[in-house]
Image: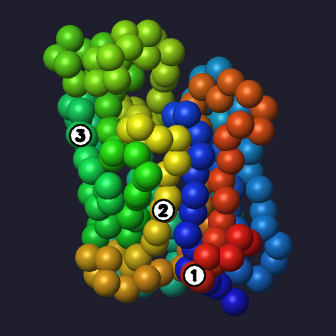
């Protein structure tokens, strides 16, 4: 039986380890690492195939097949898109609501743009412009003043009024410096760790 999932993602900067959960079998784990996005593309594609095609994008649900992706790229816009918590930008279109114990989130380009919209300028550390790359151009999604991101799922098209369950969840984490320092935890609808 499927349940609604509540996720807690802990990391210094979000980008990816891929970890889906299936309804009838035990959990399946997809993981990979590498210095460039191409190094993990096969793992990402395997995950996409396992959760099902097509990519349903902004099609309202519920839908019986396929998956949805949030790529943080804002349609390719390189502009910084800061947001508070909860971060509801994808709540109605993709069914994802993001919260943090920090002050909010930022979607920012990794490289210096000179416009003040890049990651280094936003966080006041110019080295971030060369330290952090991205899997899904052109921006990274980062919690501000926290390393925790909580995710709740809702049926797309309901503006967060109808909770949803998911068959899987994947994330790409970037610049993970220590083994076991980044993790994803799955919780059921009443908060039990799965």
Label 2 residue SS: strand
Label 1 residue SS: loop
Residue 55 appearing in the image: no
In the image, is 30 to the left or to the right of 142? right
Name the quadrant containing residue 155. bottom left
First-in-chain label (1 vs 2): 2
Label 1 close to label 2 by CB (< 8 Å): no
For the point 47% across and 41% down, which residue is it? 146
Compared to 137, does 72 lie above or below? below
Task: Looking at the picture, tell me which residue is in the foreground, 184 or 40.
Answer: 184
Task: Looking at the picture, tell me which residue is in the foreground, 50 or 139.
Answer: 139
Q: Position of residue 97 (x, y in %)?
A: 38, 64
Name the quadrant containing residue 159. bottom left
Task: Looking at the picture, tell me which residue is in the foreground, 61 or 109.
Answer: 109
First-in-chain label (3 vs 1): 3
> Where does label 2 land, which residue?
151
For the point 38% across and 38% down, which residue is it? 144
Q: Disc 1 and disc 2: Cα gap in Å?
A: 12 Å
Compared to 59, does 174 lie above or below? above
> Where does label 1 land, which residue?
189
- Residue lying farthest bottom? 1
Q: Disc 3 and disc 1: Cα gap in Å?
A: 30 Å
Q: Position of residue 129 (x, y in %)?
A: 40, 15
Label 3 residue SS: loop
């Amino acid at each position: 039986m499927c349940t609604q999932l509540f996720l807690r993602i802990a990391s210094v900067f979000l980008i990816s380890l891929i970890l889906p959960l299936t309804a009838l079998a035990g959990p399946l784990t997809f993981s990979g690492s590498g210095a460039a996005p191409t190094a993990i593309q096969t793992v990402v594609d395997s995950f996409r195939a396992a959760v099902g095609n097509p990519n349903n994008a902004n099609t309202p649900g519920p839908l019986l097949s396929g998956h949805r992706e949030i790529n943080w790229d804002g349609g390719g816009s390189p502009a910084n898109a800061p947001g508070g918590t909860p971060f509801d930008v994808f709540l109605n279109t993709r069914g994802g609501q993001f919260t943090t114990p920090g002050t909010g989130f930022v979607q920012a380009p990794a490289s210096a743009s000179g416009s003040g919209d890049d990651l280094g300028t936003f966080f006041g550390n110019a080295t971030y412009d060369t330290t952090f790359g991205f899997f899904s151009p052109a921006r990274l999604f980062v919690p501000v003043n926290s390393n925790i991101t909580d995710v709740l799922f809702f049926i797309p098209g309901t503006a967060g009024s109808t909770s949803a369950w998911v068959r899987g969840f994947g994330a790409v984490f970037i610049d993970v410096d220590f083994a076991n320092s980044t993790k994803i935890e799955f919780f059921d609808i009443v908060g039990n760790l799965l």
